[in-house]
Amino acid sequence: MNPRLVRLLGSIGLDLLRSLAIAAGIVVFTFFVIRMIPGDVVDLKGIEGSLTYSQQSAMREELGLNRGWLDQFWLWLGMVFSGDLGMSARYSTPIADLLATVIPSTLALGAAALGIGLVLGIGLPTLACLFPRSIFVALVEFITIWSITIPTFSIGILCVIVFAVWLGWIPAIGNFAVPALILGLDIAGTIAKMLHEDMTEIQTADFIRTARAKGLARVRIVLRHILPNALTTVIALIGLILASVLTGALTMEIVFGLPGLGTLALQAIKGRDYPVVQAVIIWLGFAVVMANFVTDMVQKLVDPRLRNL
């Protein structure tokens, strides 16, 4: 077998093992940390007056909450490996059904934000490189400062207050476009500055000088030579970007009242619905871990120098 292919497969295998170890750590950490929160769903229902003391004892035994944490963990882990995420303790609904209902909404918001972020984050630096003395350079700086200094959660609340409550331009609950735009600008700022700096640096490279000497048009030089070489920066940021998309989507769902993982997680936390909180956090954790794994794999396929790291 080709030695280079062996090294590549070995490197990918190590990355996969590392990713699985991180995912396992997330599972264990999530399970035990959640149980440090005072009270459980039975206590909450007891406070609400919907259960008598004997009913509370029966429900706690039925849910396994009267067992030790280790016993609960092994019981839950066996269910997960059998493909059963369990039942929502508060809503008596299979957790898999709850996730299947809300995940598409979260993915739709994340995809819209990612599309906006990539278009602005790649498009503005490209235009700034094509027209170095234009407003596009200032726009790159603007979205970079926006991304660094303005928390998406805060600007989301401000938009609800100004555009929904004061001006009445958007609905206070259920708006999709505004949170997608807020997250998109945040993603664009993450990409734009680094991409613009790389494109500016590549312009001084020898092969770009050679292309100019051959009389190639500036548009062709930027789009065919500078941009493709600078896009390795975007590839390196994919893991960070996807993590930002997912976590940002959760907060925007809560602020704008969108039905998604964020709203489900908030309701589960308020209701001390441990199985649902665990399922949401673990799903997000696995998504981020696998996104970083895929990013590392793509980088090693693109740049052979990373295969021995």
Image (spheres, rainbow, N blue to C red):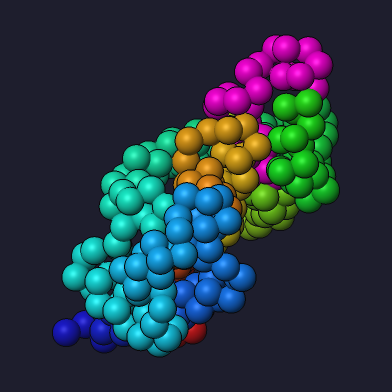
Magenta highlight on residue 211: no
Predominant SS along the magenta part: helix
Q: In this view of the protein, which residue sits in the foreground, 13 or 205?
A: 13
Q: In this view of the protein, which residue sits in the foreground, 112 or 144?
A: 112
**Residue 144 in the image: x percent, y percent?**
76, 45
Q: Quadrant of residue 252?
A: top right
- Seen at 73% across and 27% down, the residue is 160
Compared to 136, does 187 lie above or below?
below
Boundaries of the magenta span: 162-189
Left-right relation of 43 to 168: left
- Seen at 71% across and 43% down, the residue is 152
- Seen at 21% across and 65% down, the residue is 83
Q: Quadrant of residue 167?
A: top right
**Residue 306 in the image: x percent, y percent?**
48, 76
**Residue 44 in the image: x percent, y percent?**
54, 57
Left-right relation of 103 to 216: left
